[in-house]
Amino acid sequence: MVLQKKETDQRKKIQLLFLLAAGMVPFFAVLTEIFFPGAGYYLALEEFGRKPDTLTQSVKQIRDFGKNVYLSVPAVFQQNARNYMLSLEKRIKALSPDGLLVRTLDSLSFCKTYFPDMKLIAESSVYTYNQPAKAMVRSLGVSRQVLPVELNFRELECLSTDSDELI
């Protein structure tokens, strides 16, 4: 059983290298797979512009590789970002990502309203640098957070749980 899993993992790495050579996956995806084999992928929605088919293809390729897919909402969440997210609402729901990465409290509020059943992850720009702030953000529906790189090990240790990550 263990040998079979190793062979499958090896096959996936070879497949990923072929996809890299064909220009179908970025180099960082190969590095992520080699150094962080359990990691999921975060796709920044604003990078797809007005090419939603490319978003669909990217999600499919990542899922075919057996990885989790998280969609990152625009960092600057003004009216044009809201309109963009609304234009993608049906597609995002159909893609059923493993979660949405929110970067501000207003994007958190928006995602809770329009994507109430999706897992929400707070990016480190959403202030959770102490336990009361973390508890408040969790009470708003966030299930995971990206730990802030500004904190030292002792401070991170006080905040960290199994559902948090440092990227």
Image (cartoon, grey):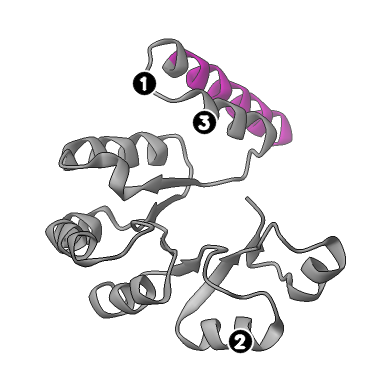
Amino acid type assigned to the residue bearing label 3 in the image: Ala
Task: Residue 93 in the image: state x and y as whole percent.
Answer: 23, 61
User: Foreground mark, 2 or 1?
Assistant: 2
Amino acid type assigned to the residue bearing label 1 in the image: Met
Amino acid type assigned to the residue bearing label 2 in the image: Ala
Task: Residue 33 in the image: state x and y as whole percent.
Answer: 60, 32
- Identify the residue position indicated by label 3 in the image: 29
Question: In this rendering, is residue 81 above or below 64?
Answer: below
Q: Main secondary structure of the magenta part?
A: helix
Rendered residue at 64%/65% (across/down) = 164
- Identify the residue position indicated by label 1 in the image: 24
Rendered residue at 64%/33% (across/down) = 5
Q: Specify the label residue 98 is tagged with.
A: none
Sequence-wise, which precedes: disc 2 or disc 1? 1
| In the displayed structure image, the side of residue 61 where residue 54 appears, left or right | left
From mark 2 to mark 1, how far is it between C-alphas?
40 Å
Per the image, label 3 sits on a secondary structure element best described as helix
- The segment highlighted magenta reads 1-18
Question: In this rendering, is residue 36 above or below 139?
Answer: above
Residue 16 covered by magenta stretch: yes
From mark 3 to mark 1, how far is it between C-alphas?
10 Å
User: Foreground mark, 3 or 2?
Assistant: 2
- Identify the residue position indicated by label 2 in the image: 135
- The reply to whether callout 2 and callout 1 are in contact (CB within 8 Å) is no
Rendered residue at 45%/85% (across/down) = 140
- The reply to whether callout 3 and callout 2 are in contact (CB within 8 Å) is no
Sequence-wise, which precedes: disc 3 or disc 2? 3
